Image: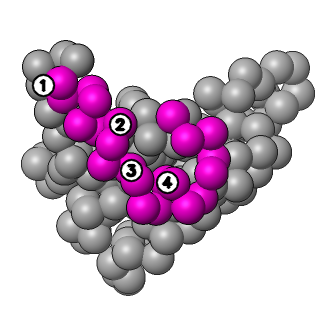
Amino acid sequence: MGAHAAVLAAADHPRVRVLVLDSIYPEPSFRLVRDVYARWGFAVRNLSFLPRVAFSLLHGATLDERGAAAELNRMTGRHLLLLAPAGDSMLAAEMQSMWKTIPEDEDADGNLVTLPATQPDGLYGVQLQRYHERVAAFFLERLPVDDI
């Protein structure tokens, strides 16, 4: 949920110029709905309202549907790196759809990289080192040294 929160915060703060978004959910309820239906595509598409209603009844609060998918198209002038987990095809497909909504901008870029594993998957050793190098390089290439 950290990547999702980062997009919502950045949407309200245009000074945030560079974001790395690892395994970002399109909306807050994505994981709940997916886990309830255990990746059964038909139910995810057609019955996703049921877990949301149950959550609201059990917790006395609603899931805010202000989603990252809707906010990414407001990220004009931002450098974005989306890191999708290859092992989670549903999330990777959602991230591909979100990536397509990023506005084209000659002064900024939006990249989608699918990795064998991402930070939430638990990276170790050489994989973790490569991940950190990739993220650091993305920031270093796009931020002035004075801003770091």
Q: In front: mark 1 or mark 3?
A: 3
Q: Which residue is mark 4?
A: 44
Q: Residue at x 19, y 17 (%)?
A: 59
**Label pair 3/4, CB-CB below 8 angstroms:** yes
| C-alpha distance separating marks 2 and 4 | 10 Å
Q: Secondary structure at mark 4?
A: helix
Q: Main secondary structure of the magenta part?
A: helix
> Can see residue 63?
yes
Q: Quadrant of residue 120?
A: top right
| C-alpha distance separating marks 3 and 4 | 5 Å
**Picture coordinates of residue 48 (x, y %)?**
38, 50
**Picture coordinates of residue 37 (x, y %)?**
55, 41
| C-alpha distance separating marks 2 and 3 | 6 Å
Q: Secondary structure at mark 2?
A: helix
Q: Amino acid at mark 1?
A: Ala
Mark 3 Cα shell of 10 Å, populated few (<14), some (14-19), many (≥20): some
**Picture coordinates of residue 8 (x, y %)?**
22, 45
Q: Amino acid at mark 3?
A: Ser
Q: Secondary structure at mark 1?
A: loop
Mark 1 or mark 2, which has the lower sequence index? 2
Q: Residue at x 49, y 70 (%)?
A: 97
Residue 61 - label? 1
Residue 51 - label? 2
Check if residue 55 falls in the magenta segment.
yes
Mark 2 or mark 4, which has the lower sequence index? 4
Q: Which residue is mark 3?
A: 48
Q: Quadrant of residue 135?
A: top right
Q: Amino acid at mark 2?
A: Pro
Mark 4 Cα shell of 10 Å, populated few (<14), some (14-19), many (≥20): some
State the extent of the magenta-drawn residues as a range: 36-57
The one of 70 and 111 positioned closer to us in this rendering: 70
Q: Residue at x 62, y 39 (%)?
A: 38
